[in-house]
Every structure is written in C-alpha cells, then in structure tokens.
C-alpha cells in the first residue's frame, strides 16, 4: 500500500461542495507530528462574599488541529512531493491555499484537511514559519511550519450532526466483546435506567450477559423520557 499524503482542499463555499483540483495542496512530506486540542468552557464567576465558585458548563469550544511539517529545497529528501521547487514557491502556493484572501468571497477560503480516512473541516487560525537553512545567497532551503486550524461547520451541518446523535432517533449498534447493555444505554440516552426498554425492544432475555450476542446488531429505540423507566 502506498503512503497516503496529507492534503488540504480549499473551497469558496461554506458547505465545501466545490472541489476544484487546482485548489488542493498536497504536503510534500507528511507532518512530523500533529496535535488535537479539545477545550470545555465553564463560567467561573464567584458569588458575592465567597471565594468558592461553581463551574457551570457553558459550551465546548471548536476543536483545534496543529500540524508541524517541513518544506525542503535541498533536493535530498527521498520521495519529496515537490522536488525541484524552491521553498519560496512552495510556501507561496501553501499560503494561496490556506491563508490569502479570495477576492470572490472577500475572506480566506474554507478548508478540509485529509489524511487517509481522517477529515477535518476547518479554517486556518495561526501559522508560524521558521526558516532553518539557507544557500549562499540567503535564499531559504528549508522551513519548518507550525499551522493551527480550528474546526468549522455551518449551522446546518452542526444541526444535522446533533440530530444524528439525538436519543430521539433509533440507533443501531454492533455488540462488541466486553460490551454491557447498561453502559451502551447510557451512551445513547445519558441514563442507564432505560436498559429494560432496550432489552424489551430487542426481545432479549437477559440484560446482564449479552456476550452470546457478540457481532449482532441491536436497536436503541426513541425513548419517551416523560414515561417511567419501568
């Protein structure tokens, strides 16, 4: 199997439906590392006359992805994707993809980062370029880039994702080794007490031992939470 390179697709529409082959930038060499950042925001205001504060949940911040990668112009890196192209031109093309303002939409373009099955819809929020090697004329021969991208989805996309994860829909799950029905119910409904309804919906004779059902699909139906769990 050939090595899958990271590529960044840029779009001029928020829904990222326009796939222009000229607007895809393939990293010449895969990142040295990448970092994902998840942040939960809380309201930490304290009541009058007390030093204690209750952490009240506000929201989850958009996820961030930080990539570290190198542009090289020495022509000594094996299987380098942009051999023969100067570091200056490689950076120019990269900036055109992720940073420069598109005159048609009056803003930088909307991005998707692809690495195999990993897809990250996003916008560039920060880019540091560190030039580390130069020729005798002072032209850069190598640059290390640290790029930060923030997850971006339209309101419609976010709404669809919330609906797809809603306990008001029927969910189907394959039973895996070690699964417990009460924990599976908790993941769907945020409460394990509906486990009996799940068992009844799937005509299960036991809620404790589901290992004989490994590999089988069971349904988690919509639950009316105003009704007693029974």
Image: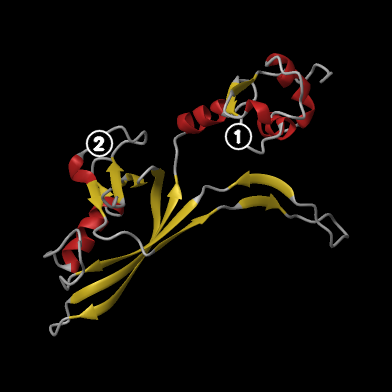
Provide residue 40's location: percent of width, then percent of height. Answer: 63, 50
**Secondary structure found at label 2:** loop
Q: Examine the image and state in which quarter residue 179 appears.
A: top right
Q: Which residue is mark 2?
A: 19
**Secondary structure found at label 1:** loop
Mark 2 vs mark 1: give the one in front. Answer: 1
* 3D distance between C-alphas at marks 2 and 1: 38 Å
Crowd tier of the residue under label 2, counting other residues whose Cα lies within 10 Å: few below 14, some 14–19, many 20 or above: few
Query: Which residue occupies 20% across, 61% down?
Result: 79
Query: Which residue occupies 56% across, 52% down?
Result: 38
Q: Nearer the viewer, residue 146 or 223?
A: 223
Disc on res. 75: none
Q: Is residue 102 above or below residue 176?
A: below
Provide residue 65's location: percent of width, then percent of height. Answer: 45, 54
Q: Nearer the viewer, residue 153 or 204?
A: 204
Q: Is residue 228 above or below residue 131?
A: above
Determine the residue located farthest toward the front in the rendered image.
212
Disc on res. 176: 1
Identify the mark nearer the N-term, 2 or 1.
Answer: 2
Q: Is residue 123 above or below residue 140?
A: above
């Amino acid at each position: 199997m050939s090595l899958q390179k990271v590529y960044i697709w840029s779009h001029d529409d928020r829904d990222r439906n326009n796939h222009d082959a000229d607007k895809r930038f393939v990293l010449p060499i895969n990142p040295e590392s990448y970092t994902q950042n998840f942040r939960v925001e809380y309201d930490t205001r304290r009541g009058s006359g007390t030093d204690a504060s209750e952490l009240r949940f506000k929201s989850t911040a958009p996820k961030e992805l930080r990539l570290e990668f190198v542009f090289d112009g020495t022509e000594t890196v094996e299987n380098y994707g942009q051999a023969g192209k100067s570091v200056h031109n490689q950076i120019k093309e990269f900036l055109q993809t992720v940073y420069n303002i598109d005159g048609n939409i009056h803003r930088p373009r909307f991005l998707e980062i692809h690495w195999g099955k990993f897809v990250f819809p996003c916008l560039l929020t920060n880019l540091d370029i560190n030039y580390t090697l130069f020729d005798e004329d002072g032209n850069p021969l190598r640059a290390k880039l640290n790029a930060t991208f923030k997850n971006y989805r339209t309101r419609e996309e976010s709404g669809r994702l919330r609906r797809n994860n809603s306990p008001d829909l029927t969910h189907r799950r394959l039973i895996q080794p070690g699964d417990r029905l009460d924990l599976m119910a908790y993941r769907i409904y945020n409460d394990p007490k509906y486990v009996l309804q799940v068992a009844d919906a799937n005509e299960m004779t036991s809620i404790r031992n589901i290992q004989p059902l490994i590999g089988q699909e069971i349904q988690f139906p919509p639950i009316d939470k105003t009704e007693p769990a029974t």
